[in-house]
Image: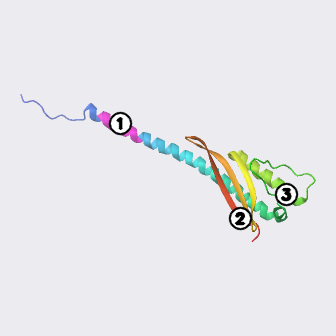
């Protein structure tokens, strides 16, 4: 009787190697998915900062008298407060700053706002916030320069 030298099917080692390759591929896809979700959250934060800066710029263009009177100047760490007994343009500016600061604080982690005059009528809106990364919180910023009067 002849000895059978050819077998059909796969050996256990071949199956285990295929499973390891398949599992590493699935883990790679899961890691990419997680990174995509994190980047989506970070892009949402940047969008919030861009929209906040554009909103504030529009408010400053609408209230040109308040802009000319430096009513929109604010430093990092400073909280806008209601203006009682002020002129109409300063009251509008205070209300605008409160609204934008509240909007940023609700949507961004540790947000801060600064508005400064850069000269020649140029204004700089500077927004900072903290973004979650694998290493912890990373400080990000968006700077928006504009001319309220063209």
Tell me what residue is drawn at x 25 percent, y 33 percent: 11
- Mark nearest the camera among 3 and 1 is 3
- Mark 3 in CB contact with mark 2 (< 8 angstroms): no
Q: Which circle's residue, 3 or 2, is located before the other in the chain?
A: 3
**Mark 1 burial class by Cα count in 10 Å: few <14, some 14-19, many 20+:** few
The percent position of residue 82, horizontal first and vertical second, equals 86, 50
Residue reaching furthest to the front: 119
In this view, the residue in front, 39 or 135, is 135
Q: Which residue is mark 3?
A: 92
In this view, the residue in front, 18 or 142, is 142
The percent position of residue 17, horizontal first and vertical second, equals 31, 36
The percent position of residue 4, horizontal first and vertical second, equals 12, 31
The percent position of residue 37, horizontal first and vertical second, equals 55, 45
The quadrant in which residue 62 appears is bottom right
Residue segment shown in magenta:
15-25
SS for callout 2? strand
- Mark nearest the camera among 3 and 2 is 2
Tell me the tag on residue 146. 2
Tell me what residue is drawn at x 37 percent, y 39 percent: 22
**Mark 2 burial class by Cα count in 10 Å: few <14, some 14-19, many 20+:** some
SS assignment for the magenta stretch, majority: helix
Tell me the CA gap for discs 1 and 2.
Answer: 56 Å
Tell me, yes or no, whether the highlighted magenta stretch contains residue 18. yes
- Mark nearest the camera among 1 and 2 is 2
Q: Which residue is mark 1?
A: 20
Q: Is residue 121 above or below residue 84?
A: below
Tell me the CA gap for discs 3 and 2.
Answer: 20 Å
Tell me what residue is drawn at x 18 percent, y 34 percent: 7
**Mark 3 burial class by Cα count in 10 Å: few <14, some 14-19, many 20+:** many
SS for callout 3? helix
């Amino acid at each position: 009787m002849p000895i059978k030298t050819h077998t059909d099917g796969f050996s256990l080692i071949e199956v285990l190697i295929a499973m390891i390759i398949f599992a590493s591929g699935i883990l790679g896809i899961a890691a990419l998915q997680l990174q995509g979700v994190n980047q989506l959250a970070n892009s949402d934060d940047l969008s919030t900062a861009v929209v906040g800066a554009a909103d504030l710029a529009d408010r400053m263009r609408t209230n040109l008298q308040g802009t000319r009177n430096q009513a929109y100047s604010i430093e990092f760490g400073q909280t806008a407060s209601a203006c009682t007994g002020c002129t109409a343009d300063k009251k509008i500016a205070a209300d605008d700053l409160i609204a934008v600061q509240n909007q940023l604080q609700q949507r961004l982690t540790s947000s801060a706002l600064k508005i400064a005059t850069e000269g020649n009528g140029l204004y700089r809106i500077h927004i900072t916030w903290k973004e979650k990364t694998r290493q912890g919180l990373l400080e990000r910023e968006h700077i928006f320069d504009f001319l309220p009067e063209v």
